[in-house]
Amino acid sequence: MQLAGEILMKRQFQFISITAAILISISACKDGEKIETIGNHTITTKEYERYYEGYVEKTARMANAEKKTLIKFICNPDDIQRTRPEFRQALMLLNPEFNYKQYREVRIIEQRAMEDGFADRPMVKEVLEQVRLETLSRLYMMDKIEAQIKITEAQKEERCQQIRTQYGAQAASMTLDDCLSYAEATLKQEIMERESEAIREEMRERITVDTNDNFDKDAFLKNGIPAYNEMRKAGNCYAEAPAPATDEAPEE
């Protein structure tokens, strides 16, 4: 009986071990394979794949470009040097080798900041919340406007011709595809600027705002914010204004 019990316990232990191994394997498949652990954060293949997809989406939105344009730069990286300077760094990071190096550095700094308790500082939390709020609002606005943008090939060709006429020799080196891509970006920017206020107004109409009529908001914004008052005091904004100039001749 004792031997049978030992055999049963051994089989149960083996079953539990196999089950645990299967669960770990399933979890690994779900999260991807470990790349490396930085501090307390483990970077997996799935995590970085999601990060890279998000980076591509962000770059396309910020550059007012379609993904097909980014694909062109991925396949022809030498063309990046012919783009606008402010976009070159972002386009270079479409290469996962460069992109991962930056992501890795950011994670290292993040871990150090966490160790120092930097992320727990009230003002840092407030700044992060402001960044989240502003980014969310901007992305949502861009998404709503993008849905309304319809640019035809004829419009892009016409704008391309305008660009070549306006910039002359500067635009002469642009290929037709580059010119059309730049034309599309400028047209998108114009549409976004034109439609932005209309979309904002539509959102204001759809969201209920309950204003406290018993609160003097103007007085609060003018004199009720301590940080603003301290800056005005530091800048001598409260100093007496100089005496007004006079046309009278000085007494002799």
Image (cartoon, helix red, strand yellow):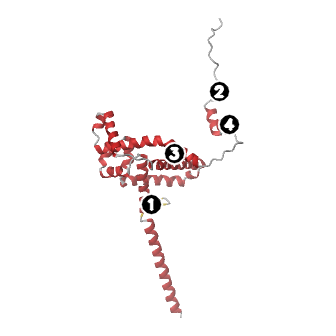
Residue 47 — which label?
1
Q: Nearer the viewer, residue 17 or 29?
A: 29
Q: Which of marks 4 and 1 precedes in the sequence? A: 1
Mark 3 highlights which residue? 199
Q: Which residue is mark 2?
A: 239
Q: Mark 4 belongs to which amino acid?
A: Ala
Proximity of marks 3 and 1: CB atoms separated by less than 8 Å: no
**Three-letter amino acid code of the residue under disc 3:** Ile
User: In percent of the image, x 63 and y 39: which residue is there?
Assistant: 227
Residue farthest top in this picture: 252
- The residue under label 4 is 219
Q: Nearer the viewer, residue 72 or 193?
A: 193
Say what amino acid the circle numbered 2 marks.
Answer: Ala
Q: Are marks 3 and 2 in contact (CB under 8 Å)?
A: no
Assess disc 1: are there few (<14), some (14-19) or many (≥20) residues with their C-alpha within 10 Å of its C-alpha.
some
Tell me the SS state at disc 3.
helix
Marks 1/2: CA distance?
56 Å
Residue displayed at 50% across by 50% down = 140
As helix, strand or loop, the secondary structure at mark 2 comes to loop
